[in-house]
Image (cartoon, rainbow, N blue to C red):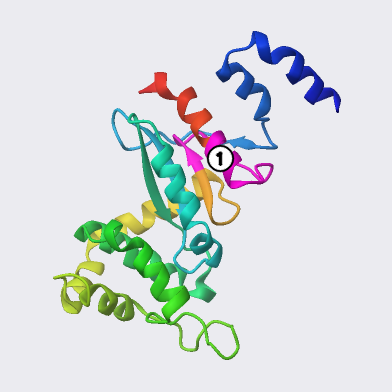
């Protein structure tokens, strides 16, 4: 047993669960501080944010984990999503605009998993060339995503495309980019608690990610 494990074992009976967790989660190993912190926009709630992209295969792979995190949160916390755009070679800017448009139209959340599946499983929105495994040429455009939503909602393609060109969508795109930069996101998926704590590479399992995020959510309870 290493020295740290021995100390945790000796101290555990005398420590509260929260204090024990504070010894377990180490700064710069399991989490990093966002500086300056970015106050979340949801009043009265602690916010857990996933920075993701529909063009990111790892984000598709962690969908079950994201659901576990969302379902594990106490009633004073909410899950939020910010779409990154920093990989233009795989259509991330287009997917970002499509996502904020769908959010503005109220159809993003209910079809979140379905759009991931259309990109990475069925090829309905074809991002990869199935023969080479490389990005398709040409890449999908926002009309392909508009058609995906049109097949499942009352929002038809022209309406979706027109909405995607509005000034408030431009503002939402800029805010997403600003948040990704302010959070110091090194890659996707990336999890941020209350605009303050960025989960780091030292968290190596899904179980630990759920535990760590909920630890920092509890730390932030008094801030709301």
Residue nearer the viewer, 57 or 92: 57
- Location of residue 153 with respect to 50 vertically, above or below: below
Circle 1 is placed at which residue position? 198
**Residue 33, image quadrant:** top right
Residue nearer the viewer, 180 or 56: 56
Q: Residue at x 41, y 71 (%)?
A: 117
Q: Residue at x 29, y 27 (%)?
A: 44
Q: Position of residue 1 (x, y in %)?
A: 86, 28
- Location of residue 222 with respect to 146 vertically, above or below: above
Q: Residue at x 20, y 67 (%)?
A: 163
Q: Which span of residues is magenta-colored?
A: 192-212
Q: Is residue 135 left or right of residue 104?
A: right
Q: Is residue 198 within the magenta segment?
A: yes
Q: Is residue 13 left or right of residue 170?
A: right
Residue nearer the viewer, 73 or 140: 73
Q: Residue furthest bottom?
A: 131
Q: Position of residue 123 (x, y in %)?
A: 42, 82
- Location of residue 182 with respect to 22 vertically, above or below: below
């Amino acid at each position: 047993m290493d020295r740290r494990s021995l100390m945790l074992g000796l101290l555990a009976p005398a420590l509260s669960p929260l204090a024990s967790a504070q010894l377990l989660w180490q700064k710069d190993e399991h989490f990093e501080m966002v500086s300056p912190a970015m106050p979340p926009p949801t009043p009265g709630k602690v916010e857990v944010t996933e920075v993701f992209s529909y063009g990111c295969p790892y984000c598709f792979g962690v969908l079950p984990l994201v659901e576990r995190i969302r379902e594990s949160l106490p009633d004073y916390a909410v899950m939020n999503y910010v779409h990154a755009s920093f990989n233009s070679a795989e259509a991330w800017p287009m997917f970002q605009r499509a996502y904020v448009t769908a959010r503005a139209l109220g159809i993003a959340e209910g079809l979140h998993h379905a759009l991931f599946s259309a990109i990475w499983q069925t090829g309905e929105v074809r991002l990869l060339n199935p023969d080479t495994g490389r990005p398709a040429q040409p890449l999908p455009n926002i009309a392909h995503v508009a058609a995906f939503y049109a097949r499942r909602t009352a929002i038809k393609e022209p309406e979706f495309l027109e909405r995607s060109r509005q000034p408030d969508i431009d503002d939402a795109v800029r805010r997403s980019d600003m948040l990704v930069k302010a959070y110091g996101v090194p890659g996707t998926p990336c999890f941020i608690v209350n605009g303050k704590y960025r989960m780091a590479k030292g968290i190596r399992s899904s179980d630990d990610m759920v535990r760590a995020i909920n630890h920092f959510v509890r730390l932030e309870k008094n801030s709301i």
